[in-house]
Image (cartoon, rainbow, N blue to C red):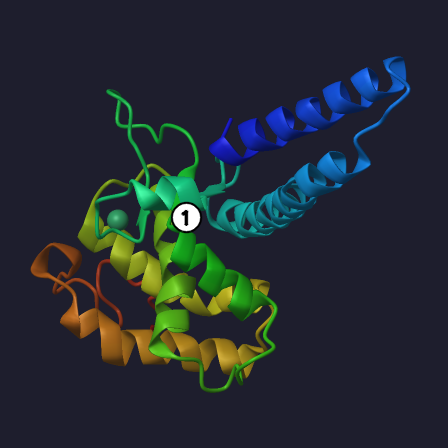
Amino acid sequence: MGIRTVAVVALAGWVGWLLFHGVVRRKVPWVGIAVISVPLVLLFWTERQWISAEREFSAVARSIAPGSAGVHCQRMGEAFVYASGDLGRVQFDENGRPDGPAMITYETCQRLTEYAHESTFDRMSPSLDLVIAVHVLSHESWHLTGDGSEADTECRAMQSDAAVAERLGATPQQARGLAETYAAAVYPEMSSDYRTSDCVKGGRLDLTPDDGRWP
Ligand SMILES: [Zn+2]
């Protein structure tokens, strides 16, 4: 249970208590109740938005890792105390199996939401930040299949970027453009742990070695 849920429950409890006491004393503090209700409604509404976003991204993750725990989007409180530079993370248990959902950072989840509900940009030419956000969802989804190797995961993810983009609402052409942008502009800049010479057309990590397409 996140801080937000605790806050919603606490505020709702407070409103209930004020109402109950007000009714008993025949003097309901409407102004106080209204003041508390503003953050309550805001928190409740944003939390609902996050939960529906997580549902959407989890469905995408399960298209790559069926039966997995899906995606957890970091909330603002978690982002505040998050010290790592990783945009996503999957924990593995002692047997090397994914433990719980993939965590995706607050900002990356916001960008995924922006991409999925395109309103302020053209999906034909998304910013690199949006391209990377889509790729993070793809990358963490591959980790959820149980693969802990960064180089293998990164290579498979790059080949799934187009499918992930399509699931988030892109057309096949827009999706292919996004995958090609990642492969050309981001992959070569990744640290060596994330790259391998096997990650080439027809190589060991080519998911569709005979189709002549890459990524
Ligand atoms: Zn990774």
Q: Residue 71 appears at what percent x and percent y?
A: 47, 43
What residue appears at the point 38 percent right and 40 percent down from the top-left corner? 78
Disc 1 secondary structure class: helix
Q: Residues within 10 Å of mark 1 (few under 14, many from 20)?
A: many
Pick the quarter of the image with the C terminus.
bottom left
Based on the displayed image, in which of its 4 quarters is residue 190 positioned?
bottom left
Residue 76 x, y percent position in the rendering: 43, 46
Up-down relation of residue 162 to residue 68 (above or below)? below
**Residue at the extreme left:** 192
Res 166 → quadrant: bottom right
The residue that mark 1 highlights is 141
Q: Position of residue 196 (x, y in %)?
A: 13, 61
Residue at 62% x, 32% y is 8
Across and down, in percent, residue 10 comes to: 61, 25
Q: Is any atom of residue 212 visible in this view?
A: no
Residue 52 vertical position relative to residue 115 in the rendered view, above or below: above
Q: Is residue 151 left or right of residue 109?
A: left
Residue type at numbered disc 1: Ser
Q: Which one is in front, 13 or 64?
A: 13
